[in-house]
Amino acid sequence: MSYSYNSVPIMPGAYLVNGQNNTTNELYHLPIFGSISSINDMGFGNEDNAYYVLPGYKLEIYPNADFGGTLSQTIDNITGTKIMYVTPTSLNNCESLKMYYKNVEISNKYTYTLYTDNSGSTTTTPSTTNKNGPYKLNNMPIFPGAYLIDGAVSTATGGFGSLPIFFSVSNLSTYPASQTPDSEDCVLVMPGYKLILYENTNYNSTAGNYVAIDNTSGTTIIVGKSNTFGTGWDNNTASSCKLFYNGNEVLSTDII
């Protein structure tokens, strides 16, 4: 099983795990869908304490960006039948990594895109055409359409690391806890989806700015960095978000 649809990854083949200290006693996970040339761009540079690698996959870990430096470690689960949990030989020393499925590298699946505030419309045109999905089973989302990533975890307040977004959320402070809002360092938006971030709760774009990241017709996973969203948007300010699949908003009632 390649965990892909039309050659687009639909679920992670591995996870990078960052273990926080005993004060917070939490773990933070970065989903890995393919080779990443700069983990630092996703907020997780040099923060790897362990890896989960699914059967059929292999990771190569590099200490520098763009797969530079001497290969630090290979985690090979290509012929495995269980999920591997591995502590790296060199902790907190990964700036890039390569991912393989059945010894074929999964490359060029991430697109690093810089957005400006109000870069897209808050309205969408629904489409019945499944471009890269459908990512649904019996009309229910079976995995996230986007992720909010918090890489700079605070020991004082805790954090969420990688937060999956299955549907529109009117108040991120309740999804799932008080550490969640105003903590996004970057976002991942899956192919077929559109994510709109709002600075205020209840999708208020009048009193606060918004950023619309449209990947409806895309074939790669978009990585948007909060500190490059443009003038008027402050890093770590998202308080609500809307999620669309092929122009149709995905609501909480779709899954609960």
Image (cartoon, rainbow, N blue to C red):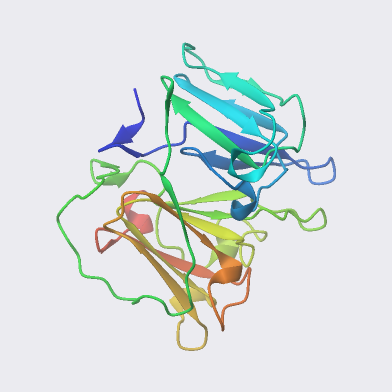
Left or right position of 68 against 13 = right
Residue 54: tell me if it is visible: no
User: Is 14 placed left or right of 4 in the picture?
Assistant: right
Please provide percent x and percent y for residue 183.
64, 63
Residue 7 occupies quadrant: top left
Q: Residue furthest right?
A: 23
In this figure, what is the number of numbered marks?
0
Q: Quadrant of the N terminus?
A: top left
Extreme residue in the front direction: 69
Furthest-left residue in this view: 128
Say above or below: 102 vs 139. above
Q: Nearer the viewer, residue 47 or 69?
A: 69
Q: Position of residue 73 (x, y in %)?
A: 66, 24
Residue 154's place in the image compared with 9, above or below, is below
Residue 96, how many percent across, how many down? 61, 40
Name the residue: 56% across, 44% down: 37
Where is residue 195, by image quadrant? bottom left
Which residue is depicted at the point 31% across and 52% down?
254
